[in-house]
Image: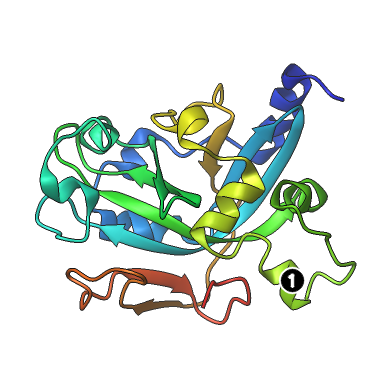
Amino acid sequence: MRSERAAARESKHFGPPLPGSFYDRDPRFVARAVLGKVLVRRWRGKLLAGRIVEVEAYLGVGDLAAHASAGVTSRNRVLFGRPGHAYVYFIYGAYYCLNFSCMAEGDAGCVLVRALEPLTGLELMARNRGIELPPDPTTRQSRALASGPGRLCDALGITRERDNGKDLTTSASDLFVFDDGYVRVKVATTIRIGITKDEHHRLRYVIAGNPFVSR
């Protein structure tokens, strides 16, 4: 197995992580801007990467569906910290969800990552998910590899214990996002999924027509 140092050297081919200034703005702008960017994970000496194709924006204390709506707690403290950090929570007693903190320190907001188009490390992603990777990447099972917030966290080995509060803006991190120059054709918006409060807001953003979107 390659060392973490070797994986770090290889990750340089991905380009520098998005800076903190990218995340230091309204989550609605970050959500649109981050579509098409690449999420990279260094995992046990290997590299996993997927293109972000679906996200949801959460607006902070004024958004009743947001974790930040209750104010600062031990669970959501990352949201009120510096922008560009991972906020990871456990939901339904079953799976983890990855968010990017947005806005200036003290002003909460975040973007939930809902689906990835796998690019690198598909076999390891499948192993992490406990499934076999079909040889045809267009099959439904391959498309579902990292389609959904819980699935993508399983595929990339993301947990609250390991990753909550992690700085996404430094190349020293084993979790970061970078821009590979991909140009989206069209972004579509819908209401958010699986919430019961402020559900009418069209704050779910997807790359229109991408087969790796969760729904």
Q: Is residue 76 left or right of residue 41?
A: left
Give neighbour class at mark 1: few <14, some 14-19, many 20+ (Cα, 10 Å): some
Quick check: 193 above or below 166?
below
Residue 72: image x %, image y %?
15, 35
Q: Residue at 74% across / 27% down in the picture?
A: 7
Where, quadrant-wise, is the N terminus in this rendering?
top right
Q: Nearer the viewer, residue 135 or 12?
A: 135
Q: Is residue 81 left or right of residue 56?
A: left
Residue 63: image x %, image y %?
15, 59
Quick check: 199 above or below 107?
below
Q: Residue at 18% across / 68% down in the picture?
A: 197
Q: Which residue is mark 1?
A: 141
The amino acid type of the residue labelled 1 equals Gln
- For the image shown, how many numbered marks are present on the structure? 1
Q: Is residue 152 left or right of residue 21?
A: right
Residue 105, by quadrant, is top left
Q: Nearer the viewer, residue 158 or 179?
A: 158
The answer to whether one can see residue 156 in this image is yes
Element at label 1: helix
Residue 121: image x %, image y %?
77, 47
Residue 132: image x %, image y %?
83, 59
Q: Residue at 56% across / 21% down in the picture?
A: 172
Q: Nearer the viewer, residue 181 or 135?
A: 135
Q: Give the residue at the far bottom of this rendering.
A: 209
Q: Nearer the viewer, residue 35 or 116?
A: 116
The answer to whether one can see residue 168 in this image is no
